[in-house]
Amino acid sequence: MTSFLPARRHVRTPFVKSPTHLDALADAVPRPYWLDGRQAPEPSSALTADTHADLVIIGGGYTGLWAALQAKEADPDLDVVILEADTCGAAASGRNGGFCASSLTHGISNGMDRFAAEMPELEAQGLDNLDEIERAVLKYGIDCDFLRSGELNVATEPYQLDELGRAAELAASLGHDVRLLSAEETRREVNSPTYLGALSMPRSVAMLDPARLAWGLRDACLSHGVRIYEWTKALSLNEESHGIEVRTPYGKVRAARGILATNGFPPLLKRLKNYIVPVYDYVLVTEPLSAEQLASIGWKGRQGVGDSANQFHYYRLTEDNRILWGGYDAIYYYGGPVRSELTLRPDTYAVLADHFFQTFPQLEGVKFTHRWGGVIDTCSRFCPFVGTAMGGRLGYALGFTGLGVGATRFAAGALLDQLYGRYTERSRLRLMNSKPLPLPPEPFRWIGIQLTRWSLNRADENSGRRNLWLRSLDRVGLGFDS
Ligand SMILES: Cc1cc2nc3c(=O)[nH]c(=O)nc-3n(C[C@H](O)[C@H](O)[C@H](O)COP(=O)(O)OP(=O)(O)OC[C@H]3O[C@@H](n4cnc5c(N)ncnc54)[C@H](O)[C@@H]3O)c2cc1C
């Protein structure tokens, strides 16, 4: 997740450090709220025999599902297979915050730093992409509580107000509908005593139920004849004379073309390890708020909210008026392991709970019902890249960092254009034809990330003053974000 504010934000965090709200976590189950006991589709059978296809897609999150759906929309006769190690939407796509942003570049400021000349086009195509997602939700009857309610980027420190002003001008110049709100106006939208002002972007972000979006896309794929094999982990990928071969535990898939859509999981194409790291992001969800509790915070517009520190929180209402509260800590573990036990992190939940009650003291006494985490695929430029390998037969779309709900559709489409040799508006973008700077190997990777996190934390505590390390990274266009 990100906000539209500049990536280099100068904010002193107002939050305390010793946990005081552990009781609110006492009954929080360690499962994503979105996936908990809610009408998940019956899983498809695993692949148990060798098969052929025109296109094989590895990974059944948004990237894989959007790729399959758009491939079928373009050519209904194409035989498309998805191989999913778990069930579709079980990973990041079914456990995220559900902020579906138009930004393709992890925020406007990050985009300006890296793709300034292309930004008018990137923002226009990003807004089109969000419109297309809204159209697909309607067209396929996807019941995912899609609401184009926008986002509020709130200032909680005086010096953030100037940044909001600059961000508003920039966003308006790039075609966004924006409004700067005073402290009073902000608190009329969502009432926290910590707010000093906000930038409202009512059309640039939609809120949705992430798991129901993934399940709806899965249904749409099936109705188009996509063959989905769940509980089917791809074990290896090999180039063949006429295509690629993917080995799974019980069968092989031979296909003319393939797509790797495996996000932060270990990539089957080894060289991609140089570009992405798995980073864990953590979330809490409260019990449903009563009418009085809801009235005490307002929030009639149901916008997503993000604050403005380097280590930021994102939060929103669910359909049944719970508050989803996530972000702040973004954790990288040495060597980049992806393991389900790492999606649970008690220390982070304790910190998140405290920050929640500091933001909404009027909700003292509210309990959390769910706590979880998930993996994002952070790259050094924080926004997606696509590319091909194996003589143009294998494509990949990765690097979404924490803002992939909307961008996955776009990147999957651009990747299909590349794989099938179509020259389109999106496939010719520099964003879609360039790679992030590679990350150093371990132990330098871990040391660099820890030093960067430590420095970002220091900057948040010291009115945003960036130390020599951060300034050096800024100069070469590197950093760490979620
Ligand atoms: C806690 C959290 C909050 C977030 N909040 C937001 C938000 O509010 N807004 C936003 O825009 N973004 C958010 N994100 C990021 C967003 O969820 C992701 O960018 C997006 O879901 C990526 O989709 P994907 O399909 O690429 O990856 P995934 O959903 O991770 O899918 C990859 C799939 O590949 C499968 N797979 C991996 N290896 C193999 C293999 N060898 N064989 C077969 N299958 C394999 C996995 O099982 C998985 O299902 C958040 C992420 C997290 C974790």
Image (tube, rainbow, N blue to C red):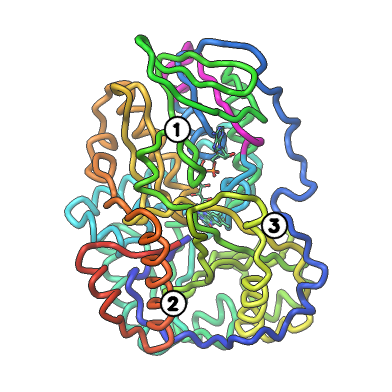
Q: Which amino acid does label 1 sit on?
A: Leu
Q: Which of marks 1 and 3 is nearer the N terminus?
A: 1
Looking at the rendered structure, the secondary structure element under dot 3 is loop
Picture coordinates of residue 186 (x, y %)?
Answer: 50, 80
Tag 2 and tag 1, C-beta contact below 8 Å: no
Looking at the rendered structure, the secondary structure element under dot 1 is strand
Quick check: 467 left or right of 289? left
The residue at which mark 3 appears reads as 319
Label 3 environment density (alpha carbons within 10 Å; few <14, some 14–19, many ≥20): some
The residue at which mark 1 appears reads as 260
The residue at which mark 2 appears reads as 309
Q: Does the magenta stretch include residue 79?
A: yes
Identified at 58% across, 23% down, the residue is 248
Q: In this view, does 481 lie above or below 79?
A: below
Q: What residue type is labelled 2?
A: Ala
Outermost residue, left direction?
A: 117
Picture coordinates of residue 324 (x, y %)?
Answer: 65, 65
Magenta segment: 71-88
Picture coordinates of residue 216 (x, y %)?
Answer: 63, 36
Quick check: 133 left or right of 435? right
Q: Does the residue labelled 3 lie within 8 Å of ligand 1?
A: no
